[in-house]
């Protein structure tokens, strides 16, 4: 798929990106190359490839699920400017 400079400008506008006019052609070439690669990859037959979660196929090391900090809730509530029913009160920021 080949993108034009106009396509790149439309994409940049939608993504709210500022792109210099002299870089538009370079972006069009790079994005077209990425889309061509995605097209090639989608045409590959992957029916015999077993799905995996990670290419290294290793198990995740997990830390022990133990309590490592004290419950300081009452201390933090006592120094908060405003609280109510165990909740922190903050100024309204969304109308």
Image (tube, helix red, strand yellow):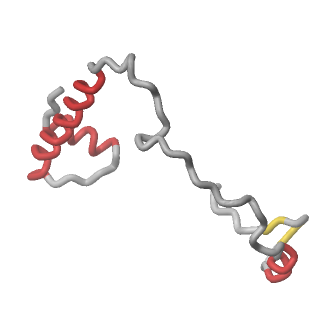
In this view, the residue in front, 57 or 51, is 57
Q: Quadrant of residue 74?
A: bottom right
Q: Answer left or right for 93 relative to 24.
A: right
Give x and y (percent) for residue 87. 83, 65
Q: Which residue of the protein is positioned furthest toward the right in this rendering?
A: 85
Q: Answer left or right for 71 relative to 49.
A: right
Q: Answer left or right for 72 relative to 28.
A: right
Instruction: Name the residue rendered at 29%, 51% in the picture.
Output: 17
The quadrant the C terminus occupies is bottom right
Q: Answer left or right for 38 relative to 81.
A: left
Q: Quadrant of residue 13?
A: top left
Instruction: Name the residue rendered at 28%, 40% in the picture.
Output: 11
Instruction: Name the residue rendered at 17%, 34% in the picture.
Output: 32
Give x and y (percent) for residue 47. 39, 16
Counting labels gives 0
Give x and y (percent) for residue 1. 18, 26
Give x and y (percent) for residue 85. 90, 64
Instruction: Name the residue rendered at 42%, 44% in the picture.
Output: 56
75 in relation to 14, above or below: below
In this view, the residue in front, 1 or 18, is 1
């Amino acid at each position: 798929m080949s993108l034009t400079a106009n396509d790149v400008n439309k994409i940049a506008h939608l993504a709210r990106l500022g792109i210099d006019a002299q870089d538009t052609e370079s972006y069009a070439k790079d994005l077209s190359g990425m889309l061509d690669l995605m097209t090639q990859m989608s045409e590959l037959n992957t029916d015999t490839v077993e799905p995996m979660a990670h290419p290294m196929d290793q198990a995740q090391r997990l830390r022990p699920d133990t309590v490592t900090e004290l419950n300081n809730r009452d201390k933090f509530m006592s120094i908060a400017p405003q609280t109510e029913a165990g909740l922190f009160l903050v100024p309204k920021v969304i109308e």
